[in-house]
Image (cartoon, rainbow, N blue to C red):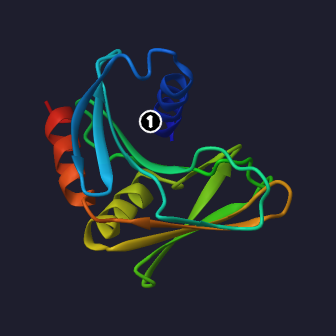
């Protein structure tokens, strides 16, 4: 859990940092996924994508994306998170469905959703590597149901690029 909190802190720091766009090293675009490396601290690798389709009866919504974050030299699979573009309903959960076969329940914190444990992250990544389509369902603080559909095309290649850089 401590590693998860550290990764969350690093992610939120980078997301809000004006240096976000200036200090990254592009690891490549792989179909629908983009991999990037940041030199900050010990180094952080990320891979991300935006949904192919966003559904829900909302009037305003911010940026929406899925991301895997890995600290350089970390032995874990990476940390999966989703940014909803709105604040989730308090104590709500997010459902992730891969290829209508594999389901995962994530916890929410403000506008993000996370797997419960490193083991859950590893399992989620395993099925993302094997899958074609991922659906993410959440509920906003205003009670709006959303459904975002992501392509997993290019996930494996982006994941390999991220791991190659961050295993060093």
Residue name at image x 71 percent, y 68 percent: 56
User: Which residue is at the far bottom?
Assistant: 101
Mark 1 surroundings within 10 Å by alpha-carbon count, few (fewer than 14), some (14 through 19), many (20 or more): some
User: Which residue is at the far front?
Assistant: 59
Q: Return the residue nearer the eye: 94 or 35.
A: 35
Residue 80 appears left or right of 158: right
Q: Secondary structure at mark 1?
A: helix
Residue name at image x 77 percent, y 67 percent: 57
Q: Position of residue 120 (x, y in %)?
A: 44, 60
Relative to 88, does residue 96 appear above or below in the rendering? below
Residue 139 appears left or right of 80: right
Q: Position of residue 3 (x, y in %)?
A: 44, 36
**Quarter of the image containing the C terminus?**
top left
Residue name at image x 57 percent, y 23 percent: 16
Relative to 38, does residue 8 appear above or below in the rendering? below
> In this figure, which residue is indicated by the disc labeled 1?
3
Q: Position of residue 50 (x, y in %)?
A: 46, 53
Q: Place residue 126 in its image quadrant.
A: bottom left
Q: Place residue 122 in its image quadrant.
A: bottom left
């Amino acid at each position: 859990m401590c590693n998860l909190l550290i990764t969350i802190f690093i992610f939120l720091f980078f997301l809000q940092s004006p240096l976000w766009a200036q200090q990254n090293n592009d690891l490549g675009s792989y179909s629908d996924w983009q991999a990037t490396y940041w030199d900050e601290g010990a180094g952080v690798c990320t891979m991300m994508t935006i949904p192919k389709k966003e559904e829900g009866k909302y009037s305003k919504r911010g940026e929406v994306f899925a991301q895997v974050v890995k600290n350089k030299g970390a032995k874990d699979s990476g940390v999966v998170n989703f940014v909803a573009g709105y604040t989730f309903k308090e104590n709500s959960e997010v459902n992730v469905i891969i290829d209508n076969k594999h389901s995962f329940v994530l916890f929410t914190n403000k506008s993000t959703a996370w797997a419960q444990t490193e083991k859950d992250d590893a399992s989620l990544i395993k099925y993302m590597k094997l899958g074609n389509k991922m659906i993410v369902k959440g509920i906003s603080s205003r009670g709006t149901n959303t459904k975002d559909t992501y392509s997993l095309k290019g996930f494996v290649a982006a994941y390999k690029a991220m791991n190659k850089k961050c295993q060093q």
